Image (spheres, rainbow, N blue to C red):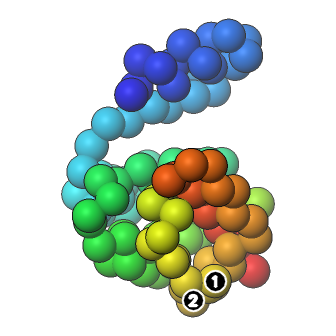
Amino acid sequence: MCGLIESNLDMCRVPEEQTDVYNSEASDFLHQAVTRKIPGWDIIFFDPPYKDNYLRVLEFLNSHAVELLNEDGLVVVEHHRKNQLPESIGQLQRTRMLKQSDSALSFYKTH
């Protein structure tokens, strides 16, 4: 998946020094990012296996949104279209949902 994302970034001519692509367990990586004080991101794309519990990671993102997201940052969650994610989780508010086939993308911003 990372190779595909990096190829798309190259096709869009996004300079490598402006991107970071990680492939890791979301909860482990986010805990490390907060602990290590890694600078926040403009976009966090969360694509867990469909059977996973999304809420634990989304609640952590909500609790640490200031550290993990830049101003106007966006959390994009890919999920099965039948998996209804909440409209809001604390300060994260879903602003949009796109459905295609069995998949959906939910877009969250802080409010």
The residues tagged by marks 2 and 1 sit, at their Cα atoms, a distance apart of: 10 Å
Q: Amino acid at mark 2?
A: Gly
Eyeballing the image, is 96 above or below 98?
A: below
Q: Would you name the residue on which mark 1 appears? A: 87
Measuring from the top left, give residue 16's x and y in whole percent: 58, 16
Eyeballing the image, is 3 above or below 28?
A: above
Instruction: Please tell me which residue is depicted at 32% across the width and 77% down the height of the picture.
Output: 56
Q: Is residue 108 left or right of residue 30?
A: right
Q: Is any atom of residue 69 visible in this view?
A: no
Q: Count neighbours of disc 2 (C-alpha within 10 A) and say few if under 14, some if 14 to 19, many if 20 or more.
A: few
Q: Quadrant of residue 35?
A: bottom left
* Quadrant location, the N terminus: top left
Instruction: Please tell me which residue is depicted at 49% across the width and 31% down the height of the picture.
Output: 20
Measuring from the top left, give residue 9's x and y in whole percent: 62, 20
Instruction: Please tell me which residue is depicted at 62% across the width and 78% down the height of the picture.
Output: 92
Eyeballing the image, is 84 above or below 38?
A: below
Q: Would you name the residue on which mark 2 appears? A: 90
Q: Is residue 59 left or right of residue 100?
A: left
Q: Which of 73/50 is in front?
A: 50
Q: Which of 30/36 is in front?
A: 30
